[in-house]
Amino acid sequence: MTGAKKKIVKTIRIDVDKCNGCRACEVICSALHAAPKYSSNNPARSRVRVIRDPLADIYIPVYAGEYTAAECTGRDKYVIDGKEYDECAFCRASCPSRDAFKEPDSGLPLKCDMCESDPTLTEPMCVQWCLADALTYEIREEEADEQPSAEDVDVGLEALANKYGWEKVLDSIARKSKKA
């Protein structure tokens, strides 16, 4: 399709065979997202988690994806080196059925932002700190999707309102609409 809009997609490629379970990615991510930056380290605030089975020497980094308002129906089981894992263990979504990838104090969903809150970075901190090279930063172009759905906008606004309150959100929308 010629003339289609393109978008830049940024991802972290994970090579589970290289991960040694050091969890440096979790440590630096939680420190970067602390307020103020680097003031504390709480892996519960990290946007990347390492699923661990140290006895079987299995470590799988998973970074936070989109929030989903509904609990998924997938309950598949995966067997890796004889150990059974629930499908949720590898899921990147923040959802109502589990506590993973949620802000520990507020319960707001966390999503990997590729460390774009710090414009001087060329790649996410977890990739920079991964000494085993299990994490690789990739940028590619894809065809752009249509506009976000109304439901996506509602979820985003609700998350902002839960964090800052409706009055501040509406105030901000009013200010932005005057500038547009």
Image: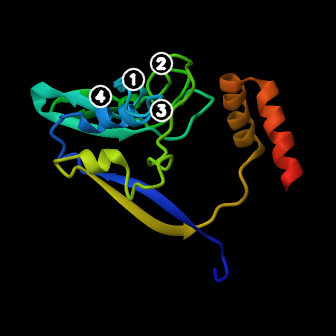
Instruction: Give the answer, above or below, for where 166 lies relative to 5.
Output: above
| Tag 3 near tag 1, CB within 8 Å | no
For label 1, the residue is 44
Question: Mark 2 or mark 4, which has the lower sequence index?
Answer: 4
Which residue is at 32% across, 37% downward?
A: 28
Relative placement, left or right, of 45 versus 27 is right
Q: Position of residue 86 (x, y in %)?
A: 35, 27
- Residue 153: percent from left, percent from top: 73, 41
Q: Are marks 2 and 1 in contact (CB under 8 Å)?
A: yes
Q: Earlier in the sequence, mark 4 or mark 3?
A: 3
Q: Residue at x 75, y 36 (%)?
A: 154
Instruction: Work out which residue is located at the far bottom of the displayed protein and give it.
Output: 2
Quick one: quadrant of the N terminus?
bottom right
User: Which element type, helix, strand or loop, lies under badge 2?
Assistant: loop
Q: Secondary structure at mark 4?
A: strand
Q: Can you give x and y, in whole percent of width and height, for residue 97 in the image?
A: 51, 20
**Quadrant hosting residue 51:** top left
Secondary structure found at label 3: loop
Residue placed under numbered mark 2 in the picture: 104
Q: Earlier in the sequence, mark 3 or mark 2?
A: 3
Task: Give the left or right position of residue 96, taking residue 171 as reference.
Answer: left
Q: Is residue 14 left or right of residue 97?
A: left
Q: What's the distance in space between the residues labelled 2 and 1, CA to CA? A: 6 Å
Q: Which residue is mark 4?
A: 85
Tell me which label, 3 or 1, sits earlier in the chain.
1
Callout 1 amino acid: Ala
Q: Earlier in the sequence, mark 2 or mark 1?
A: 1
> Which mark is drawn over residue 159?
none
* Residue picked out by circle 3: 74
> Cα distance, mark 2 to mark 4?
24 Å
Mark 1: secondary structure: helix
